[in-house]
Image (cartoon, grey):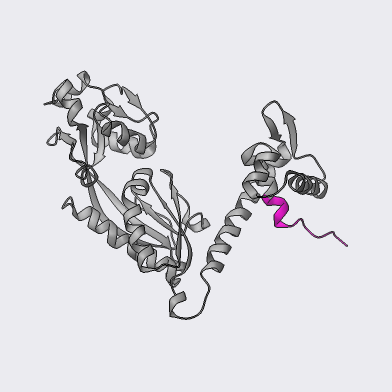
Amino acid sequence: MNPPPPSWDLYRSFLAVIREGSLSAAARALGLTQPTLARHVAALEEAVGGSLFVRSPRGLDPTDAALALKPQAEALDRAAASLWRTASGLGAGPEADVRGTVRVTASEVVGARILPAILAGLRTRHPALEVELVLSNSVDDLLRRDADVAVRMVEPDQQALLVRRIGSIALGMYAHRDYLDRHGIPRRLEDLGHHSLIGFDRETPDIRAMMRRMPAIALPRFALRSDSHLAQLSAVEAGFGIGICQVPLARRNPDLRRVLADAFDMPMGMWVAMHEDLRSTPRCRAVFDGLAAGLRDHVSADHVT
């Protein structure tokens, strides 16, 4: 008779050690004691018949066996999180229709600067609603249930998704008025070579697509490079130099001034998406519809559709 497979608790502890790099940090992350976590790892090592970690000056490093198990453990982690989000929304009665946890993913700027006000309104209308907000410029896979609802700046091309196009947002070049007072206002794209420019560190697919549409942005050297769009925006607001910003978002800050509006005006699409199987789940549908309505108001502030 084959022994029973290891329980999820063992894999959860194993995954925490990989992520945190030590037993003590993993124990704190899971709210367990270090001896309990050590027992979990030892039990899993006994079940798989080999060592999963080796000690190093950095802490605990995963072995090849651990790295082979990691993708499946991460899949279990996502499935467990999705299962809990579903279970947390179960209830009876009209007040329980919109309740439980919804995991929302969005780009850094959208998630940090635009969504909080929309989500606050949703929470007011649905007090039993809980939101997990993931800020990432990568495209999460809704089919794997990494998230329930996604706000995307590229059109989703996956099947089995419910997708709603919000509209287009113009991108413009902006600088703080104090910066322009010190360095002057550029009148031509060629003038940017004499300014402190804020831009990307690595060329991602969306950056390359933007450069094909507007080759001039690839010409200057950046005085500040960051792959974090939120860091770029903060640098513009701090007066570091000139950077790219969403036009309706920049209009919220009276100290930001648009430059080279005639030479640089680029629309960027926005979509809200979720797995089509979630359309009948009240909490997910409420968040999907609420985000779509709130983002339409944001887009309409620029009068670009």
Residue 267 horizontal/vertical position (percent): 22, 45
Residue 9 figure quarter:
bottom right
Q: Write the residue at 22% across / 28% down.
A: 216
In the rendered view, tell whether residue 267 sits above or below residue 290.
Answer: above
Q: Write the residue at 23% across / 53% down.
A: 299
- For this orientation, the residue located farthest to the bottom is 93
Q: Is residue 122 left or right of residue 181?
A: right
- Foreground residue, 180 or 166? 180
- In this orientation, does residue 228 appear? yes
Residue 285 figure quarter:
bottom left
Residue 49 horizontal/vertical position (percent): 82, 45
Q: Quadrant of the N terminus?
A: bottom right
Q: Write the residue at 63% across / 55% down.
A: 76
Q: Is residue 104 magenta?
A: no
- In this orientation, does residue 305 appear? no
Q: Write the residue at 30% across / 52% down.
A: 270
Q: Is residue 60 left or right of residue 293?
A: right
Q: Is residue 3 magenta?
A: yes
- Foreground residue, 275 or 53? 53
The magenta region covers: 1-12
